[in-house]
Amino acid sequence: MSKNLPFEVLKAEGSNFDVGFQIGRKFKDRIKNALKLSQLPRLTKKKHGYTEKKFDGLHDFAKKYFPQYLEEIAGMSQGSCQDFKDLALLNFMSVYGGCSTVVFRRDDRIIVGHNEDGSKVNKDNSYLLIVKPKNSVPFFSFCYPGEIPGGAFSFNVNGIVTTGNAMPRFNDIIGVSRTFLDRSLLEAKTIEDAIRRALFPYRTSGFSYNIASMKEKRAVNLETTPKKHYLTEIDDRFFHTNHYVSVGLKKIRQDVGKSSLRRYREGTRMIKGAKEKTSEGVLKILSSRANKPYSIFAKGGEGCSWTFCTALFEVSDGINLRVYPPLQKKNQHMRFSLNSLD
């Protein structure tokens, strides 16, 4: 593992509060810096209408259905010396940048590749977590400062791999923030269990979940809105960006960004042209610089995110994950497996 790799790894354990506290204490400066640079709590109140009444409604739902994750935020608040309400609001927002995901399936082998894209504010602030919660499921997760884990790319001790793509937002409701549902997926035992968690009936917004199961040798994509969903079984090859593309939801009214559309067109073209379904083929797709500034490997620009890293999961009898920082040589990556959770 190269010493020049940008992602620190924190191993945390204990109660939800303990885990949050350890994260907050370790990444105190990053959390403080991310809140300061983004000014998200102030902007959300102005842009998305997060009034006191709406905040209270979201908080009440979270407290009723997922109080343990509010405890993680409380621990993070105390550990980082940041205001609980600011951190809670950050998690209620459920705002992520654009990401691109490739899935190849061949017999009992599944390859999941994912570019984690986001705003430049978080480019140097993100980190990796290995968590052993008390009386719950150990997991690995890429995490943004101030947010509970689950919304990026992750795997757990049950052999469930998840990656996510932010989707156009419309008709948001008062309910449980998607961030809390993403966190819940980290405890899933099977794909059906993960689907059930993602389809929590009082969800505030939609998302695209890419889920693979080591034990079941199965991979799916689940697109959701606050009221609808569509499940796609992945039997061969699959590509997703940041708008609804499934048979069941692609015709809904949505505001599709140029970056998502261009990346989707290029990605679907490349997966169709791939002669073999290999890890190298996945990396080739995810490193594409075609159609700048709207390339799959994102380097900013108007309406575009930045690629923080590329995650490559090889799922068969085990889970092997390689995390490639941007513009690094192929041998400069971080490796994780189920043994990392021991």
Image (cartoon, grey):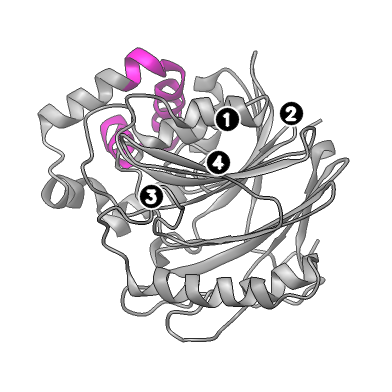
Q: Nearer the viewer, mark 3 or mark 2?
A: 3
Q: Nearer the viewer, mark 1 or mark 2?
A: 1
Whether residue 281 sits left or right of residue 72 in the image: it is: right
Q: Earlier in the sequence, mark 3 or mark 2?
A: 2
Verify whether residue 112 appears in magenta.
no
Residue that lies at the very extreme toward the right in this rendered image: 317
Q: Earlier in the sequence, mark 3 or mark 1?
A: 1
- Give the vertical position of 69 relative to 178 (above or below): above
Q: Earlier in the sequence, mark 2 or mark 4?
A: 4
Residue 205 x %, y %:
32, 40
Mark 3 surroundings within 10 Å by alpha-carbon count, few (fewer than 14), some (14 through 19), many (20 or more)? some
Which residue is tagged 3? 249
The type of residue carrying mark 2 is: Asn
Split into 4 quadrants, where in the image is the N terminus? bottom right
The type of residue carrying mark 3 is: Leu
Give how far apart the Cα atoms at labels 3 and 2 are. Answer: 30 Å
Nearer to me, 3 or 16: 16
Which residue is tagged 2? 158
- Give the vertical position of 330 relative to 26 (above or below): below
| Circle on res. 194 | 1
Give how far apart the Cα atoms at labels 3 and 4 are. Answer: 41 Å
Q: Residue drawn 18% across and 24% down?
A: 56
Nearer to me, 278 or 305: 278
Split into 4 quadrants, where in the image is the C terminus? top right
Q: Which residues are magenta?
A: 62-90
Q: Residue drawn 46% across and 86% down?
A: 292
Magenta: predominant secondary structure element? helix
Q: Earlier in the sequence, mark 3 or mark 4?
A: 4
Which type of secondary structure does the marked residue at label 2 adopt?
loop
